[in-house]
Amino acid sequence: MEGPGERQANSLSKWLDNLQQESWQLELLISGFTVFLLIAGLEPYHALEAEVDRLMDTSLAFDLLVLPYQTFRAAYYVLLAGLIIHVALRGLWIACVGLRSVSGDIDISALNFQSGFADHLAKKIGSFDRYIERLENLCSVLFAYVFLLVFCLISMLLYVIFVAVLRVFLQFILGTPLTNQSPFANPVVAFFLGLGILYFIDFITLGALKRWRWTAKIYYPFYRLVSFITLANVYRPIYYNLVDNPFGRKMAYLAIPLLLLVLTAMSFQYVGESYVAYNPDEEPGYWYRSEVYEDQVDEVNLERPSVPTQFVDNGLLPVFLPYLPAFHDPNIQKVCPELEPGKYSGPKLRGAFRLGEIVNFDSDAGQLLGCMQQLWRIRINDSTYTEVPLRFYYHPERKQYGLRGIIPVYHLPPGEHQLMVDRYRLSQDRMQWFPGREIYFSIIP
């Protein structure tokens, strides 16, 4: 006689058996809906890259956004590519099921092929029912497999973030400055990096370190630690349910090659302009760069000065000089070490909670403007323009703070001229002038 626990287990097993028979409908619904959303979100997703660049220009602290963004990018394309393949295969499966209801199994003998062809096709194709079953297995495994890859990418990101935070914390405790030195220079950070590499090797070898008696006992506590950091419990049942059968193991071994294939596809570009000069930044004087003309592109280069248009017909040329805190703040502190900042930078709370001051009432707007003006030098052709008034400005299209000036050019003859905006910046612990990139503009008579 069955006990309550056995009856409950049998009931759950029967419910799951019945549910998996109809799971293809849910798979197709979720895949189709998700593919639609992902394709519709491609344009906003690409716009997100400009926002990430803007934040990175705001503070060095946002440099860490590169890794989450690239991980999100990889997961986005893995999910999109995987689910498109799943929808196509599931559509093929439905087509085969519908065809079977009309024509039944494959009858090679009815085709009157010669024995060589008939034997070969009978051996290679086999039963149509078996073909449908293989498609069903492939579709069901692929659906879970795609989400497993996405969660694996997220886990890798979590571990890298943990190591990065650990490195910053140790440097803060030890009182050492943040530098670009190798993370392996710190023994604690190097240990966790090595541990992560071991965990990755164990993952892609389907648990090789867990099988060897002389490594299993040593590896076990570290395995538990890394599993906790990476939230591996979220996807571990899927992983082990996948690799406990031959077909699933083949799919698991393909994980890294498939990820590399997706990343390669993301990076693919075709170059066809054989006789065009390679790089306008490295070959000044030969290019019109559209990103410096605000009326020619939707998104100008956020790091470069820009002008509204290439053609001037009223004798006045406005120019915008972007303020990039991550780049310019060290230069300002070097030029004006006693300068009071206009705002207190860093995270603040405004809303349901209020924490941290934003405005520095001890600052002087004139001193701020005067100091920032020292970082720029405006030249047209061979002349330096020292009397161009610059003022603070928030550029509505670029969504950037900076300086804006109006350069009088009515005295210049009609035709093309060259604007150069030089930068005064730190180099090897001292301030130096660096020539800017040329901006060509034309005076219309």
Image (spheres, grey):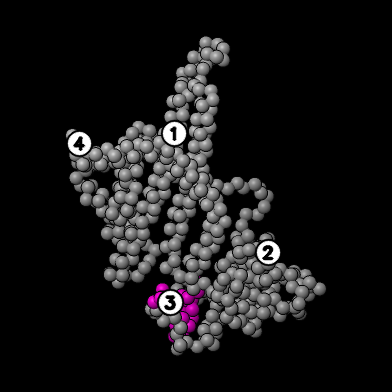
At label 4, the amino acid type is Glu
Q: Range of the magenta residues?
A: 327-353
At label 1, the amino acid type is Glu
> Which element type, helix, strand or loop, lies under badge 2?
loop
At label 3, the amino acid type is Arg
**What distance separates the C-alpha of mark 2 from that of mark 3?**
37 Å
Tell which tag, 4 or 2, sits nearer the viewer.
4
Q: Which of the two labelled residues, at mark 4 and mark 2, occupies the earlier sequence position?
A: 4
Q: What is the chief secondary structure element of the magenta stretch?
A: loop
Residue behind mark 2? 296
Q: Quadrant of residue 361?
A: bottom left
> Which element type, helix, strand or loop, lies under badge 1?
helix
Q: Nearer the viewer, residue 150 or 4?
A: 4
Residue behind mark 3? 350
Residue behind mark 4? 2
10 Å crowding of disc 2: few (<14), some (14-19), many (20+) = some
> Residue 413: where, in percent of width, then height?
78, 75
**What distance separates the C-alpha of mark 3 from that of mark 4?**
61 Å
